[in-house]
Image: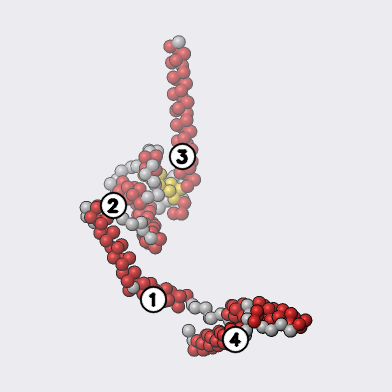
């Protein structure tokens, strides 16, 4: 905080405190006057004018005096203390938490929590199992996902280097549209294990390293055309099989 801002903050605090002191003095003076005045029933009645004077006293007693706390509340609301910055709020909250930890109540609460944790550990028969751990925070998940994406890119580049970095059908060489294709059409077995996983890329790279002819690289168009052709052939095979089965059934009848 700069020196000018601190000076303005101190001046505003002093004005606020002076207004509070002035209102407290005014309220105390009115209360002392009300206590020093005789009660309404003890005041003399002076014929026709006495009633009017008594009514005026009652109005002052019931109307003027209750206005002072309202005025005080209004002035306090108008002259507010300066707002704290976020750093000052955090420092104040941290200091308050530390005071609570140092207090008798805080120490007793933390001791009870430690005892409950020790009882749970004894009930488990030892420390927490490795498989049961606390879920990762958002920052930890982001770091892990970033590392996985980087490893996935490295594996994809290694696969493209081993396959020539182009489509084996049309020769398209833009790596953004190149895809991994199963030559025998048995991709359902791998896609069931989540093809976007790192294990899938490791398996493809391992297969290419051993010389196994199971994977190839196609562009998106050729890969989709190949899938349509294989689907059409499978449909024709299913239709031919159904026709043969129907003919055999008719011959049996």
Sequence-wise first label, 1 or 4 = 4
Q: CA distance from mark 3 to mark 4?
A: 104 Å
Q: Nearer the viewer, mark 3 or mark 4?
A: 4
Residue at the spot 47% in from the left edge and 21% down from the top edge: 243
- Which of these two is toward me, 195 or 26? 26
Look at mark 2 in the image and give the residue it sits on: 131
Q: How many marks?
A: 4
Neighbours of disc 1 within 10 Å: few (<14), some (14-19), many (20+) = few
Residue 53 spot, x, y in % from top left = 72, 82
Neighbours of disc 3 within 10 Å: few (<14), some (14-19), many (20+) = some
Residue 214 spot, x, y in % from top left = 34, 42
Q: CA distance from mark 2 to mark 1?
A: 37 Å
Sequence-wise first label, 2 or 1 = 1
Residue 133 spot, x, y in % from top left = 31, 55
Q: CA distance from mark 3 to mark 2?
A: 41 Å
- Which of these two is toward me, 121 or 242? 121
Neighbours of disc 4 within 10 Å: few (<14), some (14-19), many (20+) = few
In-image side of 236 versus 77 (left or right): left
In-image side of 225 versus 156 (left or right): right
Neighbours of disc 2 within 10 Å: few (<14), some (14-19), many (20+) = few
Residue at the spot 38% in from the left edge and 42% down from the top edge: 192
Residue 96: name its quadrant. bottom left
- SS at circle 4: helix
Look at mark 1 in the image and give the residue it sits on: 95
Task: Pick the quarter of the image with the C terminus.
Answer: top left
Q: Which mark is residue 247?
A: none
Sequence-wise first label, 1 or 3 = 1
Q: Nearer the viewer, mark 3 or mark 2?
A: 2
Look at mark 4 in the image and give the residue it sits on: 36
Q: Which mark is residue 227?
A: 3
Q: Is residue 130 above or below residue 227?
A: below
Residue 167 in view here: no
């Amino acid at each position: 905080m700069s020196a000018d801002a601190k000076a303005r903050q101190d001046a505003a605090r002093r004005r606020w405190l002076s207004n509070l002191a002035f209102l407290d003095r005014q309220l105390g003076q009115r209360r002392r006057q009300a206590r020093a005045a005789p009660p309404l029933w003890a005041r003399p009645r002076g014929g026709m004018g006495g009633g009017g004077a008594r009514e005026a006293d009652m109005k002052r007693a019931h109307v003027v005096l209750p206005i002072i706390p309202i005025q005080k509340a209004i002035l306090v609301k108008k002259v507010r203390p300066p707002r704290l910055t976020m750093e000052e709020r955090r420092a104040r909250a941290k200091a308050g938490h530390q005071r609570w930890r140092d207090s008798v109540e805080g120490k007793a609460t933390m001791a009870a929590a430690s005892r409950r944790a020790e009882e749970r550990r004894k009930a488990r028969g030892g420390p927490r199992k490795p498989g049961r751990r606390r879920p990762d925070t958002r920052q930890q998940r982001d770091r892990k996902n970033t590392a996985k994406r980087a490893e996935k890119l490295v594996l994809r580049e290694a696969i493209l280097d081993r396959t020539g970095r182009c489509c084996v059908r049309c020769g398209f060489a833009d790596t953004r549209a190149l895809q991994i294709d199963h030559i025998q059409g048995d991709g359902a077995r791998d896609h069931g294990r989540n093809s976007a996983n790192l294990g899938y890329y490791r398996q493809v790279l391992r297969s290419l390293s051993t010389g196994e002819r199971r994977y190839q690289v196609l562009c998106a168009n050729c890969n989709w055309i190949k899938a349509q052709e294989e689907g059409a052939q499978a449909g024709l095979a299913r239709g031919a099989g159904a026709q043969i089965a129907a003919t055999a059934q008719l011959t049996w009848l």
